[in-house]
Amino acid sequence: MKNTLAVMLALTAGALALPAQGALKVFACEPEWAALTQELGGNDVDVYAATTALQDVHKIQPRPSLIARYHQADLVVCTGAELEIGWLPPLAEKGNNPKVNPGAPGYFEASHFVSMLEVPARLDRSEGDVHPYGNPHIQTAPDNIAAVAKGLTDKLAEVDAAHAAAYRQRYAQFSAKWTTAMQKWAAKAKPLNGIAVVSAHKAWAYLYRWLGITEVATLEPKPGIPPSAAHLEEVLSGLKIHPAKMVVFATYQDRRPADWLSQHAGIPAAELPFSVGGTAGADDLFGLFDVTVDRLLVANGAAKP
Amino acid sequence: MLKPVLMPLGLTVVLSTPVQAAAPASQDQELRELRAQIQQLQQEYDQRLKALEQRLQQAEAQAAAPPPPPPPPPPVTTAQNGNAFNPKISLIMNGTYAHDSSSAPATVPGFLLGDEATPGPSGVSLGETELAIESNVDDQFHGWAALSVKPEGGIGVEEAYVNTLALPAGFALKFGRFFSDIGYQNHQHAHAWEFVDAPLAYRTMLGNQFGDDGLQIRWLAPTDLFLEFGSELLRGGAFPAGGERRDGIKAWTAFAHVGGDAGSGGSWRLGLSHLHANADRRPDGGGIATDFTGTSRLSILDAVYKWAPDGNPEVTNFVAQAEFFYRSEGGTVVNDPSGAADTSLYNGHQRGFYVQGVYQFMPRWRVGLRYDRLGASNTLSNAVPGTTLQTLADNGGSPQRYSVMTDFSNSEFSRFRLQFNRDQSRPGQAVDNQVFLQYIFSLGSHPAHQF
């Protein structure tokens, strides 16, 4: 009897240490939203990240494991703005989960809380895989993260009203820490203000706006179309007129075109994490911007931190 | 920013000087009042100037910090006309150049072929143009229609179904015309296949692809392992069912799928499915018709494994898939029913499988290999020589085929493919070397990715 009681107590203690049984199941389309939900939800949430920073979010397939996780989710947190257009609709069709289908209360779109950049004036596929609602890579600037954090807190409090106070409290803590961190990053990144760069993909509009960086060329001739040798030559000769300080690419992208340009133009290549988990040190949202700013500074000529 | 503030201050100074100089004694009272007023004014401006300086300092301090988060975007204003509610529309265009070294009729020993199973024309030809229209109907239903426009004219309805969005407890219903979820490749539209043509098992036992009118119910288990069960109740209008008197349910299917991830870059799915079909004087696709009346029972085991480094298919990725078919048929066959009407009892067992692998070795470029094989052990009571009945009774054929292909995709929306087949599916394993050059283009809405 005593033993049974001890086992039961141990099990209870074990259950308390893990996310609670009734924890809100969150399906995050991208790792940055998984990290943000974890910051705001603590052990009131059980977060599943559908993709990693090593994957190209445009090119995900609705594979069986995603269908199974989507089916069980209480809340789906995605960027929206058609970033997941290729795989979220099939998940909604096959995942049999009306709670979280686009439009339902259990569906959260981060891009609603951000003013979108690069909204195309002309919608035509000859421009490549353009996103009609603007550049969807909103997680590359910390002020966007701050805006989404507020909206996500409201959503968490709405779908899990029992823990609303806890979400709001964590938000207050996160928000204070984030504001301080943003000031630190901005001060540190001052030398980057006004520099010109080449990017692999049009993925950094928000980062560049935040730091005052100008994009003079992209390695992809059009969004979603892989760099060809001819286009790389074009970019290289273009650099003679509009010189750039570095070539910026994300870990998930093919690094060979970036390396090629780096060698031929004699400028450094900066490999950025793009999202949480993209490189060593980018283990959470704070680390993501620590690493991003540091690597840009190193490529800009600063000593390694 | 300071200029408008300084100007009134300067004005005050200018005003106060001449007033002091010109003041006679009798106007002392007025002068004092005026001075008091001016002093008051000066004080007010001093205070405002200090406040402004303070604000300026604050602003300078903040300039180092990032700009405040932008205001929330205005509501999307693209909905300026009724077009905003238009469904998603996409058009798939494809065309082929084909060359066959053999011009013998494309019969397969041990099998009666459906009418869709004849190979495409040789030379340059336009394939079926597919128009797909998709939209949510309301909060409960989603609709999808895929119309195929044949190159010679005429519109076919490949799929036209409505599926539920909000059934509870993991259930979903689909009704209308749809490609069955049996097997792995069956639900994929032809433009999503990895090779130009369907595997031999699909060609011979399902008429390339099995779609029919009816109802599908599907249930998804609430587990982290993907586990799905489903069943379809069908009209029985399509090969291997078909023929007259299609009242009631003349075909049904049942399927189970299990799947998940394997390591950081792999994912897999296994499926087991069954199709039970009744045929009533179902004609085949040959020149002289051969009717089949009876039942056809097909079981399929399918497996697919996909891999990419870290799950990122950008540079390289690999897809392996294999399906095993086993079919039992029993009934009567009649050759040339409107003429000689040779009749035979027929009891058949047929097997078939294919294995294929497709590897993307650099961005945009892929290569693929496929091997197909079929086998039959059929019994016919009256295998009249020189007719389709004799071909059906031919158990010694062991039809097989080797295929190799390479394709280039400029973007997600365009693809060119070159394929070579060494086809030995005709009686006596007669060799037919086939070459295909194919293009596939997708216009309009972004297509849904498939697993």
Image (spheres, rainbow, N blue to C red):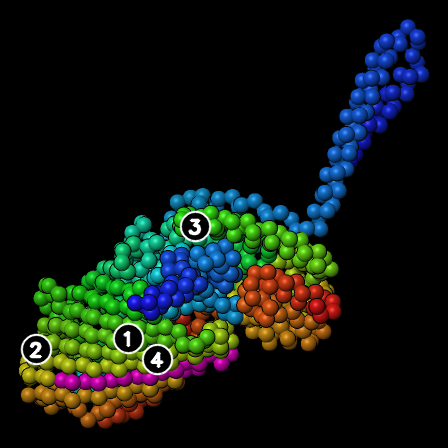
- Number of the front mark, 1 or 3: 3
Q: Return the mark for residue B271.
A: 1
As drawn, is B436 to the left or to the right of B179? Answer: right
Q: Are marks 2 and 3 on the same chain?
A: no
Q: Residue at x 25, y 76 (%)?
A: B272
Task: Give the chain letter at badge 2.
Answer: B
Q: Is residue A123 visible?
A: no
In which quadrant will I find the C terminus of chain B? Answer: bottom left
Q: Amino acid at mark 2?
A: Pro
Q: Residue A15, percent across and down? A: 40, 63
* Residue B319, placed above or below residue A155: below
Q: Amino acid at mark 1?
A: Gly
Separation of marks 2 and 3 at Cα, in angstroms: 74 Å
Q: Amino acid at mark 4?
A: Gln
Q: Residue A297, percent across and down? A: 70, 65
- Number of the front mark, 1 or 4: 1
Q: Residue at x 89, y 16 (%)?
A: B19
